[in-house]
Amino acid sequence: MVSIDVWNASVDFPIFDAKSRSLKKLALGKVGGKIGSEGRVPIIEALHDITLSLKDGDRVGLVGHNGAGKSTLLRLLAGIYEPTRGHSRIVGKVAPVFDLGVGMDPEISGYENIMIRGLFLGMTRKQMEARVNDIAEFTELGDYLQMPLRTYSTGMRVRLALGVVTSIDPEILLLDEGIGAVDAAFMAKARDRLKDLVKRSGLLVFANHSDETLLDFCDSAIWMDEGRVKMHGGLREVLTEYKGHDPFERMSAEQLARLGYTSPVLSGNGGE
Ligand SMILES: Nc1ncnc2c1ncn2[C@@H]1O[C@H](COP(=O)(O)OP(=O)(O)OP(=O)(O)O)[C@@H](O)[C@H]1O
């Protein structure tokens, strides 16, 4: 059974090359973690005293303003960052999908990159060999798959990366919002594969700013604010508090139907 537990965890970044004058200006800003400067080296407290328990089947959306700590939390949950204080325990194999370009080599072909990126995300060579044709078809890149990646446009690279990412079988899937950055037509096609991917995943945490995407993939949410967990609960409740309005309010009947919400749910619980 997969799980992630975090107890009173904080993550600090000491900044060795900060300029003290510009820091004074930053201290007045609204965005980002708290900057402490008691010692000689300023420290950004990106996460403060986080306690969380996530288990198999959880589908958690991560929301919060710029600099609130979402990406840092995802890296803590992935085991990429160790807590500066406190503890964390991750049970299960993590597929961190933070930057679609990571693990791609511009000098090798699309086909070779499919293999490399798959291995990077925890798949075996055999598993990837069994999936490569399906991925190739999904990307619609045809003969380009034999060309070096450096000849691809940005959108073509994203197609390739999305093809691989949506083909894996993750125990713990951690997604950062960059994954949504593809053209609308392709995203519509990728969305179905993403949904299947999420179904296959043991545990999902997805940082995203779009209500519709969050409602599509998640059923609970964590609201990060200045490096702290401000709220952790049902997705609709958290989004309503965070945004100041019910996310369903502004959706058309069509959107709601596509998301699988029917009118009884709406009228039954705060939809009036
Ligand atoms: N490598 C780093 N070195 C120093 N400070 C960092 C580093 N990574 C993040 N921070 C700081 O930690 C805080 C939280 O950043 P984080 O990237 O986690 O926020 P976020 O919620 O993902 O923001 P966004 O929505 O803008 O991507 C910010 O104040 C940021 O300046």
Image (cartoon, helix red, strand yellow):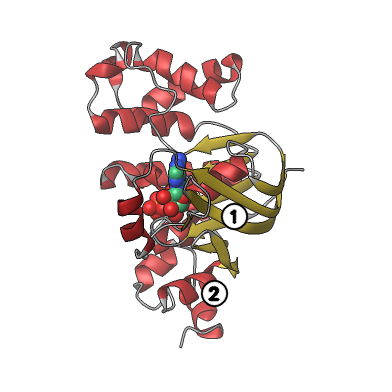
Q: Are marks 1 and 2 in contact (CB under 8 Å)?
A: no
Q: Nearer the viewer, residue 198 or 181?
A: 181
Q: Nearer the viewer, residue 232 or 136?
A: 232
Residue at position x 55%, y 47% in the image: 12
Q: Amino acid at mark 2?
A: Glu
Residue at position x 59%, y 26% in the image: 122
- Which image quarter: residue 256? bottom left
Residue at position x 36%, y 50% in the image: 20
Q: Earlier in the sequence, mark 1 or mark 2?
A: 1
With 238 as the anchor, is 138 left or right in this view? left
Q: CA distance from mark 1 to mark 2?
A: 15 Å
Question: At numbered mark 2, what does the secondary structure look like: helix, strand or loop?
Answer: helix
Q: Which residue is mark 2?
A: 237
The crowding category of the residue bearing disc 1, from other C-alpha atoms within 10 Å (few below 14, some 14 to 19, many at least 20), is many
Residue 249 point in image, percent of width and height: 39, 78
Q: Amino acid at mark 1?
A: Arg
Residue 165 point in image, percent of width and height: 47, 33
Q: Which disc is residue 59 wearing?
A: 1
Residue 93 point in image, percent of width and height: 66, 34
